[in-house]
Each structure stands twice: as structure tokens, then as C-alpha cells.
Amino acid sequence: MKIKSPHRFAGTIVFSLAALMAACPRAALAHAVLLSSTPHRNGIVNGPDITINLKYNSRVDGARSSLSLLRPDGTVERISAPTQSAPDLLSATGHGLAKGSYVLRWQVLASDGHITRGEVPFQVH
Ligand SMILES: [Cu+2]
């Protein structure tokens, strides 16, 4: 019986590890990453009422997530209770937005227990 050379054996292990890591993408990094949003980043929407939709790469806990709006005058308004039509989606409505530059700030709790936050700047016309 011929025994594999040590070099080939090591090469097999390296290849197997690489295959394993490729097979479970981001499984260990399941905190929420924003995939898409309405308004779009730097997008323009019509006021005075706007629809807010945030789609994430994983399920988020809407009850432990929060949305707020930084208004053109510098004040910050908390947006009450986002709804969830799907586990990875947060939705809300903003009321009475005058024309100007806004920043939507989001903070979400993902199923892995990690909190992530981010901002979506947009314009109301
Ligand atoms: Cu995480």
C-alpha cells in the first residue's frame, strides 16, 4: 500500500477547510445588515407622508428595534412602532415631512442577539 506524501495530505486539509468556509457563508455573522431601503440612500421622495421600508439580510426583532428621523432643522423624531410584514423587514410611515434633507436612523436587534445601526440620508421634495 502506498502512503500519501505529507505534502499532499496537508494540501487536502487546506482544500477541505476552504470548501467548508465557502459552504456556510456568513453563518457565523448573522447580525443584521441593511440590504435595501425605501427611501433609497440619497434618494428623493414626495412628502408630506413617506413610506419607510428597510430590508435586512436576516430576521430582526421589530419590538426591540427603533427608527428615528433627523429633520432638516436638526431635531430628531422617534418613529413609533415599526411593523413587520416579514421577519427581515421593518416598515413605518413618516408624517408631515416638509421639503428638505433628512436622515433616517435605524437600530435593529438581530436573531443572533447583536444590535446594528445605520443611517439612510434622503431628500423630501
Ligand atoms: Cu452578529
Image (cartoon, rainbow, N blue to C red):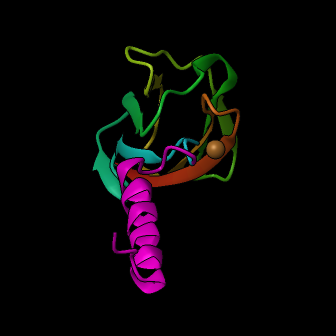
Q: Is residue 83 left or right of residue 125?
A: right
Residue shown at 46% from the left, 23% from the top: 92
Q: In the rendered image, which quarter is residue 65 located in?
A: top right
Q: Quadrant of the N terminus?
A: bottom left
Give how far across and how far down residue 36 sits, in percent.
34, 45
Q: Is residue 73 left or right of residue 88?
A: right
Q: Main secondary structure of the magenta part?
A: helix
Give how far across and how far down residue 13 sits, in percent.
46, 68
> 27 above or below 53?
below
- Viewer-closest of 30 and 14: 14
- Viewer-closest of 36 and 119: 36
Q: In the rendered image, which quarter is residue 57 located in?
A: top left
Q: How many marks?
A: 0
> 36 above or below 94?
below
Residue shown at 41% from the left, 65% from the top: 18
Give how far across and how far down residue 10 sits, in percent.
48, 77
Q: Is residue 112 magenta?
A: no
Q: Is residue 4 magenta?
A: yes
Residue shown at 70% from the left, 32% from the top: 113
**Residue 66 visible at all:** yes
Give the residues in magenta.
Answer: 1-28
- Viewer-closest of 33 and 107: 33
- Viewer-closest of 105 and 96: 105
> 29 above or below 111?
below
> 35 above or below 50?
below
**Residue 101 visible at all:** no
Give how far across and how far down residue 14 sits, in percent.
45, 72
The quadrant of the picture showing ligand 1 is top right
